[in-house]
Each structure stands twice: as structure tokens, then as C-alpha cells.
Amino acid sequence: MGSLENGSDEPLTPEGRLFLQKEMNQVIYCAIGMKQPLDVDALKLAIQSCPMYTHPRFCSLLVRDSAGREHWRRTRVEIYRHVVPVHGPVAEGLSDEAAVNKFLADLSTDSPGLMGDDKPLWDVHLLMAHQCMVVRIHHALGDGTSLISSFLAGSRLVDDPEALPTIGPSLSMMKRRSDGGGEWWKAVVRVLEVVWFTVVFVVEFVLRTMWVSDRTTPVSGGAGVELWPRKLATARFSLEDLKVVKSAVANATINDVLFGILSVGLFKYIDHQSPNAVREGTRITGVAVVNLREQRGLQELSNMMKGNPGLRWGNKFGIILLPVHYSRSFGDPLEYLRKAKSMMDRNKKSLEAHFSYKIGDMAMTFLGAHVASLLNYRIFCNTTFSISNVFGPREEITFGGNPITYIRVTTSSLPHVRLQNTRASSSVVSRMKSLSGLMWGV
């Protein structure tokens, strides 16, 4: 593969450089299930027709200059080097779901295999026996919002092969989020709450980069854990069941319900692994990755491909801390949801995600990528788990003419238990009968 000489190299963004540091070298793995057997030639053609394929990041080599600074250098993409058919079962005696998870876990320990200097930092593995396409992309190329929007721009609706899918919350959800107003004193109280909760976060954020850490539990991570062999597991929850639980607590959201489920799941796992090893009330802190772009439709997000400065391609997200307190049992199971909602409501009143993004950007600018990556690494080492989710399509979709049955995402190289949720709209999930895509990585 030869590089293109016409045109200068483009320096990486500060966030892109962060993900290339040894401590934060992250790769995104996306498993995409297909309804029909995989057609290698049709999928290659669909990949080449996808806007992601022609984006400069996906057509560039990672190179370093004499000072060690990373740059993107345009090159010609040879599709046969990026699409790898895998014939036969990837694991014997396992269901398709378990086999795909094992393949992802094994692949995630092979991050250096993606980091060659002879081709762009992405590839696609076609698991023929499991009707699954596994996309592996280095995080330096973009974040979840950038990548899912560009992938969906190459997809089409099952019901209308010429129409693009839509992503993001429904108009009714956006309206509920924007509802507000009221007396002037309520606005003053809201401002004071934002200031207070933001200050509290800033203090804890700084302490977490230094020495404050969670107590050791059976789910604790720490430095070096990201190098261990990995185990992935998936879970599905009926959306109708989640709605029933949500309706039992005033103003609760699906995210509140999911986080309540995750917290009680962690508690039960701790009890199973080490009964009576953790004291009642012990704090277990999670890190949530939050998209900082305004949620828009797919057509507007596709402008990132065209260099729209307001919709910059790449990585633009912050983090928030999610503290939960270990409890063996509540008399009322809904108490887990109430506590999760209370904690999530406090986070919504702060600017912590924006602050973490800004402080990270400043650290990259003034201290350099190595120091910034160490500070980020310390935060993950001093907490217990991480969680993120992205909005999926609101309709049933196809890729290369093959209907998609699920999208599951995980990442590598964090010293954490990793929880990832890919959310579709209710119209899609009601046909699938479940929220598919919640994935644990250990």
C-alpha cells in the first residue's frame, strides 16, 4: 500500500493522541449480527460504498515525525487487507452469541495487531458460521457518535431500501428534556444547584487523579488489569418490562432502570464471589462516558464528513463519576431504582462532563499526551467500572442488503469492568423483544 504524496500530513487531534498512549491505547469492537448468511462480495461493496470508507481518517496511515509527533498520511485503501472472512465456527460447543463474545474477547487482547504502519487502523472480520460482522476500529479514529453515524449513513431501512435510518431520541423525548420554565426563583435554585454539584465534582475529579480510590472488592480493577485475558458476556432485557419498572418511580428513565439493574447485579456478584467480604455501605464508583455533541439527526451528523466546524469529527466526550453504595438487600427492590435515579439526577445538574473534557484538553495542550494519559489512567485505576451507551437506529435496518439483528459494542485497554449498552428506539426493540447489546467486559 503506497501513501499519496500530493498533500501534507495532518496532525492528530489532542484527543486522538491520547488514545495512542500506552496507558490509554483503546480499540473499539463492534459485533453486528446479520439475519441472512454473509455474502463476502456484497459486504465488501457495501463497506466501499459507506461514507466511513471514504473519510480521511479511514484512508490514512498513522505516521510519526522526527520529533515523535503523530500525523495522518493519506493512502490508498486495499479492501482485501481490511476485510477478513473467518470460515467455520470460531469456538466449538458454544452458542452463536457465546462464540462471538469469545472471539471479541480474544481479539481484544490483540490490539497491537491493528497498530501496524502499513494500513489504516481498522479492519472487519466476517464470522461466516455465525452470520456476524466484527468491526475493529482504533479509538483515535473517532468516538461512538462519529462512528455510529457514519456506519448508519451506509445502511438503509428494511421497509425502504432507499431511505436512511434515523438515530437519537424521539421528538417527544426531546420535548420532555426541554420542558422547563417556571418562576424566577426556581431558575435561581437550578443555577445554584449546577454550581454546587459542579464544584463537588471538580474536587472529587482532582482527588481521583491523585490518590483517592475505591476500596478493593471482587470487581476491582487497577493498573495492569487491562492486560489480563478478557471475558465478555451479554444480557437482554425486555423493553416492556423496563417500562413497567420505570413507571413505578415518578420521573424515572430507562437509563435509571438500567443503572439500577447494573448496580444490584454488581452487588450480587460480589456476594457470590466473596460473601461478607465487603462492608455495608462501601462506595463503588463508576465512570460514565458522555457524548458532548448536541444530539442531532443522521443527516446533520453526516456533515462531520464534510468538515462542518460545529460538528467536528473525532472524539468529543466527557466523563462523569457514578457512585453507588453496596447493600446486601433492600426490603423494596425498587429502592435500587430510587437510589440510582437520585444519583443520576444529581449528575444531570452538574457540568462535570464538560469540565472533564475541558480539563483533559488543557492537560493535552500544556502538559502533553503522556501526562494527560497518565491522569486519565489514574481516574480509571481509582474507580471500579465504566459504562457508556450510544443511540442506535430507530428503525430496522440493513447493511449490504442483509437485515441487522443486533449491534453490540465493547472496547479494550481499560483497567475496569466495562459495561456497554447500545440503545435502539422502542419501535425497533418491540420487534426484537429485547434490548440487545448490553455487554460486560472483564
Image: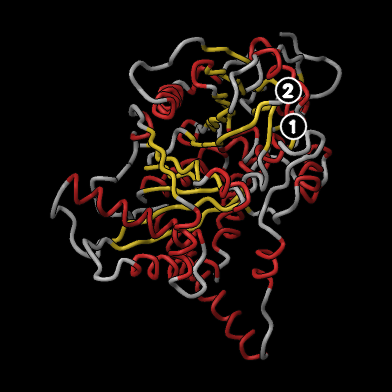
Mark 1 element type = loop
Residue 326 image-quadrant placement: bottom left
Q: Which mark is residue 46?
A: 2
Residue 144 location (% of width, % of height): 61, 41
Render colour scheme? secondary structure
**In the rendered view, would you say 359 is above or below 110?**
below
| In the foreground, 211 or 290 | 290
Asked whether 399 or 339 is in front, the reply is 399
- Residue 308, position as x, y percentages in the image: 83, 45
In the shown orientation, is residue 260 left or right of residue 239? left
Q: Distance between the residues labelled 1 and 2?
A: 7 Å
Quadrant in which the N terminus appears: top right
Q: Look at the numbered disc 2 and give the secondary structure of its residue.
A: helix
**Amino acid type of the residue that numbered disc 1 sits on in the rendered structure:** Gly
Q: Which residue is pictured at 76% across the width and 14% down the height?
A: 76
Q: Do the residues labelled 1 and 2 touch (CB within 8 Å)?
A: yes
Report the front residue among 161 and 421: 161
Q: Is residue 216 above or below residue 7?
A: below
User: What residue would you read off at disc 1?
Assistant: 154
Callout 1 crowding tier (Cα within 10 Å): few <14, some 14–19, many ≥20: many
